[in-house]
Each structure stands twice: as C-alpha cells, then as structure tokens.
Image: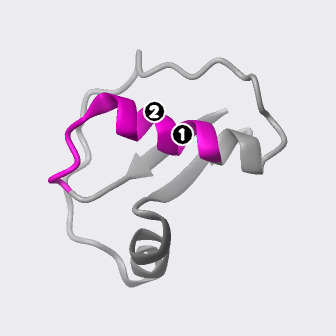
Amino acid sequence: MHFDIIAPEEICDQSVIHKYGKEYLISRGEDGQHLTSNECKRCHVEEIQPKWKSDIIEKGYYIVEMENC
C-alpha cells in the first residue's frame, strides 16, 4: 500500500505521524502491516484542501490513498 499522511505542519514528531499511519492500516484491515517512511521526503507542503479539512479537524490527519489502497 502506498499512501500519504497529511497533517498540520506543526506536527513534526515522526512517532505521531507513524501512529496515524498505523491507525489507517488498522481501519483498512491491514493491522500488523509493516509501516515505513523510506519513500517519505516530506515533499508535500501545500494548502489544505476543503475535502481534507473535516478529517484533519476530527482525527488530526488525512490519508491520501495512492496505490493498492
């Protein structure tokens, strides 16, 4: 699975971001799936899109599903 985790820029703690990823994997029935950030280069810095806003307010993050999600 390949997905991006969109979170407010003030969240810099990698363990918090990994927690978000693990929550997402659990929600997709992929509990126990190995989570890596090998491909992560923090290359996505952009304005919040309206469709992301409610999830970020509710959960603190938004998942952008990319491959095999």
Judge from the rendering whether residue 42 lies leftward or rightward of residue 63; answer left or right.
Answer: left
Decide: is 40 above or below 26: above
The amino acid on which the numbered mark 1 sits, given as a three-letter code, is Gly
Q: Which residues are magenta?
A: 9-23
Q: Residues within 10 Å of mark 2 (few under 14, many from 20)?
A: some
Are the residues at dot 1 and dot 2 in contact (C-beta closer than 8 Å)? yes
Furthest residue toward left = 10
Q: Main secondary structure of the magenta part?
A: helix
User: Circle 1 sits on which residue?
Assistant: 21
User: Quadrant of the rendered structure where residue 6 is?
Assistant: bottom left
Q: Which mark is residue 18?
A: 2
The residue closer to the viewer here, 61 or 1, is 61
10 is within the stretch colored magenta: yes
Colour approach in the figure: one colour
Instruction: State which quarter of the image contains the C terminus.
Output: top right
Furthest residue toward right = 29
Residue 19 percent across, percent down from the top left:
49, 38
Residue 10 percent across, percent down from the top left:
15, 53
The amino acid on which the numbered mark 2 sits, given as a three-letter code, is His
24 is within the stretch colored magenta: no
Decide: is 12 above or below 9: above
